[in-house]
Amino acid sequence: MELHSLFTIIMISKQSLTRSTILKMGIWITLIIIAVTVVNYWRVMSNLELQIVEQLDKYITEQGHRESSLFILSEDNHVIFKQEFLFRLKQMGNEVPRERFNKIFQAQEDGTVRMHPHFFNGFKQPDSSAIIKGLTGFIGQNVTLTDNMIQRIIIIFDMLTTFGPAWAAWQDRFPNLYVSMPENILLQYWIDTPWGLDAPADIKLGDKIWVAIADKKHNPTREALWTGVYHDPIAKDWMVSYVTPVDVNDQHLITIGHDILLNELFERAVDVHLEGACNIIFREDGRLIVHPDKIEEIRDKDGKIDIPDTGDPHLITIFQQVTTLKPGQVVINDTEYDEYLAVTKIDGPDWYFVTVYPKSQLAEFAFNTARFILIVGVISLFIEMIILLLVLRWQVTLPLQEFLGATQQIAAGDFNIEATQHLPLSRCDEIGELAHSFNSMAGQLQTSFDTLDGKVIKRTSQLDDKIAELTQTRKKLVESEKMASLGGLVAGVAHEINTPIGIAVTAASTLADRTTDAATAYDNKQLKGSALKTYFNLAKTSSNLVLNNLNRASELIQSFKQVAVDQSNLDKRSFAVKKYIQDILINLKSHLKKTPHQITVNGDEQIEINSYPGAFSQIMTNLVMNSVRHAYLKGEAGNLHFELKWDSEHLMVEYSDDGCGIPTENRDKIFEPFFTTARAKGGTGLGLHIVFNLVTQKLQGTIDVQSKVGVGTTFILNFPLQQ
């Protein structure tokens, strides 16, 4: 119940130290378990690969010796049999045992001569009590028996009765022993298989592979040979034969033969193998002898399956790798099919015996081992987490809960910790030291809080006074900047008006003088027609000068009046943006005429905005004067450009210059109050700050700046058309 309650507390408190510690420890231990499992998997896999290669080497070597022993023994038997035959033939000399031959063989109605059946069923040797079974003999049709042939037949008969029982004592090794003669004659020792009695009368022994392989046509070198795999229809069994031709004076006398039954070899190759592996046997020329998946196919095709013609890419790859094996190499690492190939040769027929071992067997074993380690690790992790949970419960969680209660009490203003909380003051570890320090801190906090309130009130009052003072100073500076701008505007307009007024006064004064002269001449009756005409021309010219210049002065005054009133008036009205910017530039002409700068305004004349013209004028004035004062060196000509764009709801003003640009490190500071790079020249750092405040607060717009040193600066302003 206690453990269950602890789990419940931990899960409810998502920020629990115990929970986070358990989770972190669990994650780290899990990662360690996974890492150990992976490392162990690869270690086991590496060891298994070394072991299986060694095991395959040993296994395939033993299999090669085992399967070769029978074939080697057969070859040794033939050497002995051949020597004994030649010895007996020489010893017989000219003796012809025809009477004995007639007792052993009987003529048959089918034209053949066959050995008497009782030699197969069992007979006693004259000089021995042992019963001999399994002898049969066959002499084909139309065979004329000569003395030499009878001599060879009797010698063969005697040798079969001697060697046959001895060599066939283990029928799983040599089930038979036979001797054929090129005259279509065969004598054989084979227990339970009456081959000579059952052979068809018209059989031609020379057509059989186990006879034909020894004739001079097919074996001109006269060496002992192994046949291929074949199925004997009389014996009804799969076999391979070892035949040795015996010649005397270039005359082929006999052929010695051993049949080795292959059923047991097939069964051993298919059934006796390493776990998960399989065995394959094939000839060097690619003739397939044994394959666990192709046994029926081999039988159906009478053993005549060549690997290159099967179309099986896996089997073809095995054949190619085995036949190109380096000398001394036993195990092949087949990376294409992820398997090992252990190779040996069966001495005698020189067959390849190949064990195919898939690497998946190793991976499965390694995986099972790694899985076991992982399961044990997970169980260990679970036990460790429970133990860790209990330790944290008593050693950390409960003391921290007491500290948590104490901190909540202090947060509520109650500093009497010792009387209300049971901190672990008796512990001698870090938790105990923390408890003493916490208790001492509570006392110090109580003392500090008793004196803190008065200090806070006093400091707050002082801070409010300073904030009010700074606010007032800032307002005065901003207002001063505005008035300075307005004063500059007044000075500029006064300078502009002075020229047309001066011209008008001069023209009016000249006209007055000429009028006085004309009046005097008229009074003295001295006024001539030509003089009167001259006076009229002068009066017309002077009147035009006075009228035009007074109209120009009137326009300047009207423009100044509108802009000046707008800058001092906070009322909102509709105005044409392009025309208004041009009026602002007229009022700034006194500042601009001293510079070689060119100012252009591009935009639709019909663009109107319902906003605060005073604030708008202040913004445009400050932007232009900012460029004039900071963007260019003295005497340097520049291009200042206004681009006006609008849609159904917004006005966008792009103001740009091609001056020196703003360094990257200053770009984010230009709208800050009192930031200026020209304080030594009288800059206040409020110009762009006023622009920013007017745009974002008064006109409810946005302002952005883009600048590149040496290229210029662009201010992008967006305003709502209606406010």
Image: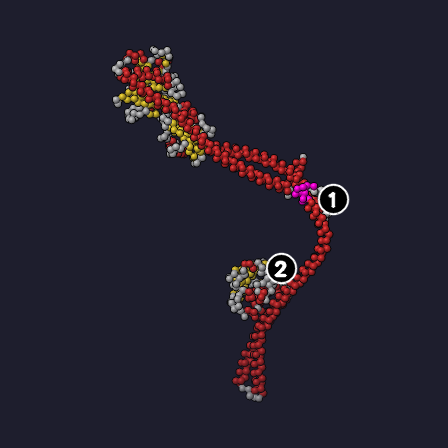
Give the quadrant of the C terminus. bottom right
Res 311 → quadrant: top left
Q: Nearer the viewer, residue 439 or 22?
A: 439
- Give how far across and how far down residue 155 sits, in percent: 30, 16
Position of residue 476 measured from the top left corner of the image (x, y, whole percent):
65, 65
Give yes or no for residue 564 being in the magenta stretch. no
Instruction: Name the residue: 31% across, 18% down.
Output: 84
Classify mark 1: helix, strand or loop: helix
**For the residues bearing labels 1 and 2, Cβ distance under 8 angstroms:** no
Residue 659 position in % (x across, y down): 52, 64
Of 211 and 85, which appears nearest the observer?
85
Residue at 70% across / 42% down in the picture? Answer: 425
Mark 1 burial class by Cα count in 10 Å: few <14, some 14-19, many 20+: few
In magenta, the rendered stretch is 426-435
Q: Which residue is mark 2?
A: 697
Residue at position x 66%, y 36% in the image: 3
Q: Secondary structure at mark 2?
A: helix
Amino acid, disc 1: Ala
Relative to 130, is 358 above or below? below
